[in-house]
Image (tube, rainbow, N blue to C red):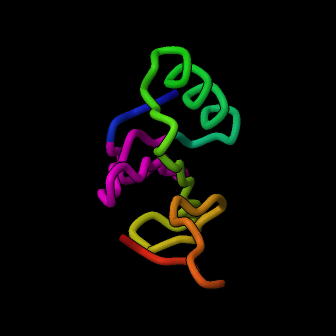
Amino acid sequence: MMALQADDCRYRIYRLRRGELQLLGTTDTPEGIGVALVLWHEEGEFSRRDTVGILDRPVPGKTGRWLVTPFREKRGAAQAP
């Protein structure tokens, strides 16, 4: 279900902590995203200041698009770290 940095997986789950974007894991299914987030939350993996992002990459090797962006909006526009 979950793999760390598997390039061929469709979904990539990130955490933005103190301006650093960190890849937490990857999965091929939407269900895997939910399971991973719940497990990481229960293990205390997230702090209150962390933001979570989910990148959808239907075509391996392509950039993809954010389903949930980890970047907080400032002055009406999303800001990358």
- Which residue is at 56% across, 77% downward? 74
In screen coordinates, is 36 left or right of 7? right
Q: Residue furthest front?
A: 75
Q: Which residue is drawn at 56% across and 53% down?
A: 54
Residue for point 53% across, 48% down:
52
Residue placed most toward the observer, 63 or 46: 46
Provide residue 1's location: percent of width, then percent of height.
52, 27
Which residue occupies the foreground of this view, 24 or 74? 74
Compared to residue 3, the image places residue 71 above or below, namely below
Relative to 66, does residue 10 appear above or below in the rendering?
A: above
Foreground residue among 64 and 41: 41
Percent position (x, y) of residue 4?
A: 33, 37
How far across and down, in percent of the image, does residue 64 sit? 53, 71
Is 12 left, or right, of 22 in this rendering? right
Left or right relative to 21: residue 74: right
Which portion, as a residue range, is magenta?
A: 5-26
Does residue 56 sit above or below 79 in this rendering?
A: above
- Secondary structure predominantly adopted by residues drawn in magenta: strand
Q: Which of 80 and 3 is in front in this view?
A: 80
